[in-house]
Image (cartoon, grey):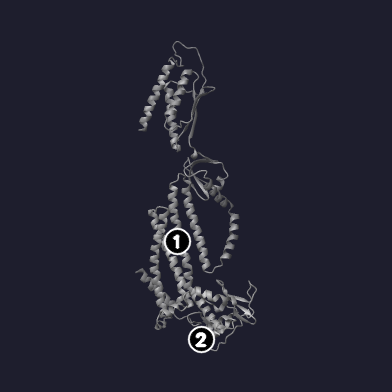
Amino acid sequence: MRFINFLLVFFLAFQCLALPQEQDTLSNGSQPLLADELKEDYEFSLKSPYHTVYSHLYFLQQDNFKPEVAGGVFNIENKKYAAELAKKLKQILDGEGLYVDMKLLPRDPDYTDNELGLHRYILFPAFPQIYVEKQGDNWYYSRRTAASIEKTHSNIYPLGADFLMNLFPQYSQKEFIGLQLWQYIGMFGLILFSFVFHKFLTLLLDLLIKRILNRYTKIREDAIQAIHEISKPLSLFWVFSLAHFLEPALQIPVEINKYIMMVLRVLPPVFAIVAAYKVVDLIDIYLTEITKRTENTLDDQLVPLVRKSLKVLVIIVGVLIVLQNLNFNITALLAGISIGGLAFALAAQDTIKNFFGSLMIFIDKPFQVGDWINFTGVDGTVEEVGFRSTRVRTFANSLVSVPNGRISDMTVDNFGLRRYRRFSTTIAITYDTPPDMIEAYVKGLREIIAQHPKTWKGFYEVQLNGMGSHSLDILFYTFFDVLTWSEEIKARHELLISIIKLAETLRIRFAFPTQTLHMEEFPEKKSLTPKYEESPDEINKRVAAFLKENEKLRKADDK
């Protein structure tokens, strides 16, 4: 139903365009000419670029068809060959929709091209080989133009300009609303063929892309829709490219054909851009799947950036191609962009510095998303790495955005890359603790480390390490085999509780800065200094009992 509606709209629009033009022009279905110049007694003239082009088109009008006279615009002795060149050149202009605006043609017999400094006039910048030049006192189509006509004509009409006309019976050449019947039949056939070809090609491309992906990887469910979204615009690219190839054979009047050819020149690159845009989405699906298999989380941030960059690149390149197909001067545009880019670069040095800082982070990988990092003024967990800045969630739960250019100049301490997390503290006990009690306590501390499931058993130190001004100092030095800061804090808590409980079991007192005044004991007062009367064996038994009970409690907590 949608296809039928499309056909109706197309024919209504086409018939409106095919209605007779305003009275200031007259056309034979090809190049229109000014009405005030169209006189039956018009004489062939080559005195200016205007007169040469006008003479060429005038004597190929339907009402005044004299190809031998029109061939005089070529400075060739073989008049029959010149007449054929004149007809083919007009067919080239009509087939490509190249509308000659007679008002723009110079009438100066001594016209000089300002850029080239020659007596030459190029009709269309897109076809620089088609131009007239002054030879003696007259203006002719150049020898280069004559030499290029055969090749250009065969490219536009590979099967011949009259191929479709000869396929249909003679009665089909009757004119109906500005067009001949065979042209309507040809248009309908081209539209129908394009529709069927589009459906067939879409299915074929679906199967082809799936087979290619199956060869190298397993197709994901979410990739099937992406493949279909690639196949449709890619199919339309080929359909409209084929239509652009076949449409000149319909010999549509140039007033209409110039718009049709403009559309047919623009649509193929537009659909190619859409297809490339969808290919980026398909690439993103598989890159995301690959990054999920890696332990590094930085590449998870890199994939969206790559996707956005590729899409921007596709759009920029596509726009340039479309502009080129619309006959814009891309060289001048790129030159202007280059100059503007230089000025922009000078004005945006910090932005560029941050961009290259981002590249260094992605290449060197000094940290990744989720790492705990510390550098000047910032201490927290990395949440996102962008092209301009890195976002860090501080332990105060605030979000800090740091320019990547600044990070690249700093020394970054990455706590997230630690294989083991160090825990070092000093246990201060009072001077009145007996040596045997200290030995038992140190031994018990070592066993606490050995029993704890989160401590690294490869290296730890528990030694009486100093005699301070108010305490005996025991060095407690170990590492935790944990991944997160929360696990580290929990393990510290468990060790510290065990250290305190063991001290309480052995009745060891922790020292703190004090001054003790020793006085003689009074009969009614007992000394505050504890008396240690146990033997070493009894002390060791108490330590063993404590450790056994501590291990039992830990296993119960784990359950």
Quarter holding residue 175 = bottom left
Which quadrant of the rendered structure holds the C terminus?
top left
Quarter of the image where the N terminus is located: bottom left
Name the residue rendered at 50%, 78% in the picture: 91
Q: Decide: few, some or many residues near mark 1? Use Cα within 10 Å; few <14, some 14-19, many ≥20.
A: many
Q: Which residue is mark 2?
A: 64
Relative to 234, 105 lies left or right: right
Residue drawn 38% across the image and 68% down it: 196
Question: x, y (%) of residue 402?
Answer: 53, 46
Please name the residue that numbered disc 1 is placed on: 275
| Residue drawn 40% across the image and 70% down it | 194
Q: How far across and down, in percent of the image, does residue 544 sit?
A: 40, 22
**Left or right relative to 277: residue 50:** right
Which residue: 42% across, 82% down?
173
Residue 96: tell me if it is visible. no
The disc at residue 520 is none
Instruction: State how far apart marks 1 and 2 are (Cα).
Output: 49 Å
Position of 477 compared to 140: left or right?
A: left
